[in-house]
Image (cartoon, coloured by chain):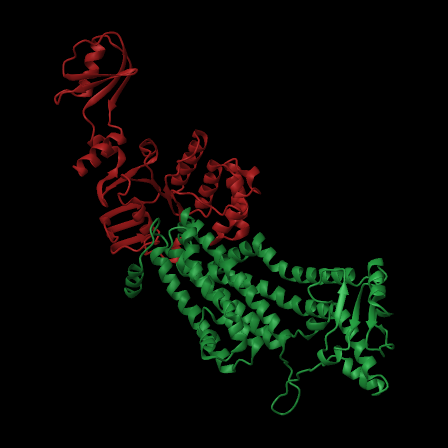
Chain colours: A green, B red
Amino acid sequence: MNKTYLIFKHEFQGMIRRQGFIIMTLIVPLVFLLGIGIYQIISGVTHPTAEITKIGYVDNIGGFDQYTTQGNISLVRFNKTDEANTSLNGGDIKEYIIIEPSYYTTGMINLYTLEKQLIPPPEITTAIKNFLTSNLLANKVPQPTIDVIEASLNVISIRLTETGAIAPEQGGYGNLLIPSIFSLLLVLSITFSSAYLLQGLGDEKENRLIEVLLSSVSTRQLITGKVLGLGAAGLVQVLVWVITAPFLINFASSSIGGFLSTLQLPPNFLILCVVYFILGYLLFAIISTGIGAISSSAREGQQLATIFTLGAVCPLWLSSAIIYFPNSPVFVFLTIFPITAPVTLMIRLGATDVAAWQIAASIGVMLISIIGGLLLTIKIVRTFLLMYGKRPGLGAILRSLKSG
Amino acid sequence: MNVVEINHVVKSYADKVAVDDLSFTIAQGEIFGLIGPNGAGKTTTIKMIMDIIKPDSGEVTILGEKLSEATKDKLGYLPEDRGLYKKQRVLDTIIYFASLKGMNPRLAAEKANQLLNQTGMLPNARKKIDELSKGMSQIIQFIVTIIHEPQLIILDEPFGGLDPVNTELIKKILIDLRNQGKAIILSTHQMNQIEELCDRILMVNDGRSVLYGDLAEIKSRYANNAVLLDFKGELGEIPGVTEQRQHKGYVELVLDGKTTPQKLLEHLVNRGVVINRFEIATPPLNEIFLKVVGKNNE
């Protein structure tokens, strides 16, 4: 049996059996489902029944007699403020308003309540506004006009293609959310797998198991098997997410609706997601292996690797800038620079149309980095892996690489 | 055919020469002792034999050819520091490493069960490595080293951490392997084990060969013309004996240059001394080691 395959299989099985990996893979769909469940419970608690809320009003202008039922809110007229206060204290009404003549000029209405409120609840404000507007316009304009005035303006942005047809991919925050979540997940996965690889390599080095392995396989077989094993585990993880994502989004859309119904998962995004996950996993696995080779312990390796994982994370810090200026040359560069490419591209995909040449260049540079990195890492491992207890300086590494 | 041929091998690190012009051979069916003080170059030599590191100059030949991926399958190595995948089960661990040596996993499982049975470890086959004691995991690593029936077995301190029962068990297996024609390199600081097991030895110091050859011949070379005697009766003055050294249960008689042990024996018998033990003294390897290394460091 091919020895690279044996190492690959061993690393892959070791990774997917780890508790951390299983939790990380399953927690994403579970958290999503939990979120939907919590929303259902909260919305059930918040709106348990269609109980009528009574709001009092004192009309110091006159003429506000109609439209006293606004959805679940009923407006009860009081002639004097004292009467309204008595009802409020007696619990007959939830709160009351006074319509002063100054309302015509200032548009201000005072709401009196026993509760401490940050702002009046939106449904109360809407009901009061519609009550006032309806009464002001009554008998002056037709009822349908009143309905239009009272309805909130709903502007829907529809993206067209150059031919005038409706584009398959539409914009909006819904489009941004999923790429942002995926980029965050990628960073978490890379950090986790990188730490796992470094720990494993550090342990093998510290207990000399690496010597037993190298007495059986070549450095190339060992490193290639390890890196591919980890890459395959990354593929499994992203596939679980990508396959469950459309179901979860449909479920969220149908049970919650609103903003979530605007979420989109275009197929080309999913494909790029898988491609960049794999490329990102492979690249960071190679970097981690190289670092593991020159580090004297797993702990030191993880400290060194942090420098590179910070590189992967940094586009997340810049995410608001990337969203507002997605085509800035800086972010185009970060899309092509291999360490920042996966996360930057995912965020940009949600905010804009990334030019095909940039995606091609980015994938190309990543592939070259992975292949070049692999060859370089094999050489570094061959030279430094068996040095125990001391880390070679940068000069020693460069000299070693130069010497061929 | 020699299993190992090392010719004028040199290996330097940045700050020192680890192996300096070393040459030796190891034949089939012998246990070869590789000894020397700490930092003498033993581990570097072993790593060059296994092709983990390359020599700066000189030639390393294993089984008649330069070490390749195919020849790696004919080699078994037990490093001084032990370590296996802690979360992996015993049987899976053995099968995995045997597969890396080119063994069919089904055959590896059969052989693993046989060796586990032979070493009394079969009840632990389903356990995880981290559930085993240090000595038990060492036995497992020893099984990993020999399961694929290598032609060359390299053992670095194989008895460290083993109890006397397991030490004897490993020794017995090693002798069996030698009798099957395997070449075994035994690197250890336990000189008694070298004396007991090895046919030939190489002593290195500062990367150089300081003693090399047949163990019995080396010991006789360092013999100091003395006899060990356990007896009953009075010895008194004995002609030809320059010194009598008392030890627990016996006396060491140092002979002058003219007196032979045969002559001494005749003299003792004629005097009516009851002899329980009469043995020509050879210096323990430990003494030779100290003498040679000490002289070399002067």
In the rendered image, is residue B174 in sight?
Answer: yes
The C terminus of chain B: image quadrant? top left
Q: Decide: is A137 above or below A109.
A: below
Tell me the residue at 19%/13% (across/down).
Answer: B267
Say whether residue A311 is left or right of residue A140: left
Q: Is residue A50 visible?
A: no
**Residue A45 percent coordinates (x, y):** 77, 59
Q: Residue at x 76, y 65 (%)?
A: A112
Give the image location of residue A5, x and y in percent: 50, 60
Q: Is residue A103 left or right of residue A238?
A: right
Give the quarter of the image for residue A158: bottom right
Image position of B255 (left or right of A130): left
> In front: A252, or A371?
A252
Occupied quadrant, residue A123 = bottom right
Pick the residue in front: A368 or A113.
A113
**Left or right position of A361 against A128:** left
Name the residue furthest bottom.
Answer: A163
Instruction: Give the answer, above or below, for where B138 lies relative to A37.
Output: above
Q: Residue furthest left?
A: B258
Number of numbered callouts drawn: 0
Closer-to-camera residue (B272/A279): A279
Q: Residue at x 57, y 54 (%)?
A: A20
Pinpoint residue B152: horizontal percent, then vertical percent.
Answer: 37, 47
The percent coordinates of residue B77 (x first, y second) are 39, 46
